[in-house]
Amino acid sequence: MAGECITPMSYTARQRKLTAYLKKESIDAFLVRKKENISYLTGARGEDAVLFVSAGNIILITDSRYEEEYKKNAGKCSVRIAGNKNLLEIISETCAETGSKFIGFEADNFSYQAYANLKKRLGGRKLIPLMAAVEDLRIIKDKSEIRYIRQACKYGVRLMNYAVKAAKPGISENSVKRVIEAYALENNIDLASFDIIVASGVNASMPHAAATERRIKKQEMVTIDLGAMYFSYNSDLTRTVFLGRINHNYSHAYDIVLASQAIAIESLKPGVYAKDVDAVSRQYISDRGMGSFFLHSLGHGIGRETHEIPAISQSSKIKLEKGMVITIEPGIYIPGWGGIRIEDTVLITENGCEVLTKGAVKYAGRNQ
């Protein structure tokens, strides 16, 4: 699903928030390199571009390949084409033209070589590394973003309900993955910006296992992790199903993961620390002797990227706020045994939360 339907006023509001932050930090201009951040601020895709942001200027600097597209799609900014110059030359010229002396840049999105070259070109001007300046704005989703994520979740639920039926004994993990991809293509559903995970049996002990030619067997688990995308916004959900009679140990572990997720979701509301949500789920699993097998954080923010702030983790210092969209995905992973993960995408509301992927089937077993 290409393009966006966000009003120009939304881009203006986002840009104003960013320039207010720059003013507070005594930064004259800010160089945005991350394509998701450029898209968030302007609506343009942001490939091979740098967005120059200052109080009086929002300039998208790119090359001639994107001139027509960006001039057509970029909202509330001007477009400047590098021509026979490179982007760093144009950035240097723009800083000089605007009298910018203190220039922030996205530290995580400029290579060291680009930083060194830019620093040389800027002469006496000071380059200031910034971390998550735009991401901090993106953490709270506006109404249009929530609408897009909600639709992405509906598509994700549809994909998952199809996927769990497609997982059958005798076919390979890769075959299941290809069937899901084909279904998405046939139904005009864009997949989320991460690779589909189909992990069966002992492969399920690896949280980010790549699908293989391993054939799924009867009476073993299959973990499926997938998502959909709508107008550049993602959903993310995971289900673990068992094909045939369920071994008691597997069933017991599944019930622990399912209950730990329910407890975590029940605790979600504005004002709660993300680390405390992680703790309540982690403690439930630990109290039942499985704590050492919960290998990752409980969840993460989701939106234009499938992994955004806030992290729902033991080290997070963030309080949840209305408008945040996160995942809750506890798991148990035991090498040589297998693994179980259950994941949903959740919106923080005024008084609690809303599970956006609740329509996906949630059961442990299937008679096959």
Image (cartoon, grey):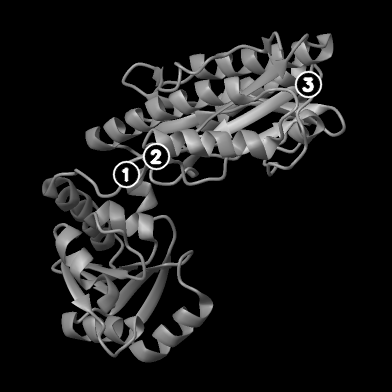
* Residue 165 vs residue 230, the one in the foreground: 165
**Residue 151 percent across, percent down from the top left:** 33, 29
Within 10 Å of disc 2 (Cα), the crowding (few <14, some 14-19, many 20+) is many
Point 46% across, 67% down: residue: 107
Q: Which of marks 2 and 1 is nearer the N terminus?
A: 1
Horizontal side of residue 225 vs 159, given as left or right: right
Q: Which of marks 2 and 3 is nearer the N terminus?
A: 3
* Residue 129 vs residue 38, the one in the foreground: 38
Within 10 Å of disc 3 (Cα), the crowding (few <14, some 14-19, many 20+) is many
Q: Quadrant of the N terminus?
A: top left
**Residue 203 percent across, percent down from the top left:** 77, 35
Q: Do the residues labelled 3 and 1 touch (CB within 8 Å)?
A: no
The three-letter code of the residue at mark 3 reads Glu
- Labels in figure, total: 3
Horizontal side of residue 66 vs 194, given as left or right: left
The three-letter code of the residue at mark 2 reads Met
Asked if residue 287 can be seen in this view, the reply is: yes
Q: Quadrant of the C terminus?
A: top right
Horizontal side of residue 197 vs 31, given as left or right: right
Report which quarter residue 88 is drawn in: bottom left
Q: Could you give the CA–CA distance between mark 3 and mark 1, rounded to whole angstroms?
A: 36 Å
Q: Name the residue under label 3.
A: 220
Q: Mark 1 points at which residue?
A: 1
The three-letter code of the residue at mark 1 reads Met
Q: Mark 2 points at which residue?
A: 229
Point 29% across, 55% down: residue: 39
